Image (cartoon, helix red, strand yellow):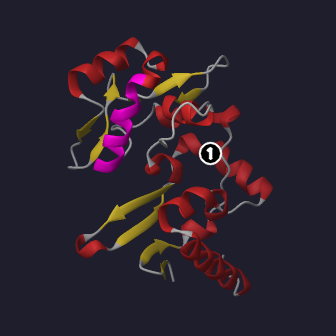
Amino acid sequence: MNILMVGDVVLSIECLREMFCCDITSCKGICCVEGDAGAPVTEEEVKAIEGITMKIWDDLSPEAQEKILEQGISYIDEEGELVTSIVNGKDCVFTCYDGQGNCQCAIQKAKLKGEISVDKPISCSLYPIREKKFKGGLVGLNYHRWEVCDGARCLGTKMRIPVYKFLKEPLITRFGVQWYEELCEVGKSLKQKGLI
């Protein structure tokens, strides 16, 4: 049993089985930089982010500012998905850096400071769980294994934190409390049966 159904969402068992806890000291937030496309975004997220872009403008690199002026904050990638614009073929335009050389999201940084009320894209908050929309409105969730997150898997294993528990808040934001509680019940049942 590798595929589960929770509510009206299909998900892989790895979303419950894998251990994960972000370790910024290990990865330096490189997920904002590495990759071949920007972060998946919805049209609603694009509109919301466009509304606050000037409030975070000074945190963006000159290259990111130029890219936004030239292309906007998003584009359609090779797979036909709406994603955040990127600089130099990799860096998300919203990447900024702290004093220790760690990548940060300028949107999240401003939100945490209380300067804006807009969140970073939910696809970023849900990572390493990736969402896929199918025809007919069905939603699928899959665990994405990426070498830049090796440190997060090690820390998650050490602390015994399953990825779905690490992602409690974004999963609730995306699917609601009731759905998340059902997910936890499924996880508990699978653990009792020795399947995770």
The amino acid pointed to by label 1 is Asp
Image coordinates for residue 73, horizontal then vertical, percent? 30, 32
Q: Is residue 127 visible?
A: no
Image coordinates for residue 10, horizontal then vertical, percent? 43, 75
Q: Does 125 sit left or right of 62 as displayed?
A: right
Image coordinates for residue 184, horizontal then vertical, percent? 65, 75
Give the camera-side residue of 57 and 21.
57
Quarter where residue 137 is shown: bottom left
Q: Is residue 12 above or below residue 85?
A: below
Per the picture, the main secondary structure of the magenta-coloured stretch is: helix
Residue assigned mark 1 = 150
- Label 1 CA crowd tier, 10 Å (few <14, some 14–19, many 20+): some
Give the camera-side residue of 187 and 148.
187
Residue located 52% across and 49% down the image: 125
Q: Is residue 190 above or below residue 58?
A: below
Residue located 60% across and 70% down the image: 16
Quarter where residue 27 is shown: top right
Read off the magenta span: 41-54
Quarter where residue 85 is shown: top left
Task: Based on the picture, tell me whether residue 51 belongs to the magenta stretch.
Answer: yes
Residue located 22% across and 26% down the image: 71
Q: How many marks?
A: 1
Residue located 58% across and 44% down the image: 149
Q: Secondary structure at mark 1?
A: helix
Q: Is residue 14 above or below residue 20?
A: below
Residue closest to the far right: 159
Q: Does 53 sit left or right of 180 as displayed?
A: left
Q: Is residue 83 visible?
A: yes
Q: Does 141 sit left or right of 192 as displayed?
A: left
Q: Is residue 28 above or below residue 97?
A: below
Task: Based on the picture, tell me whether residue 36 belongs to the magenta stretch.
Answer: no
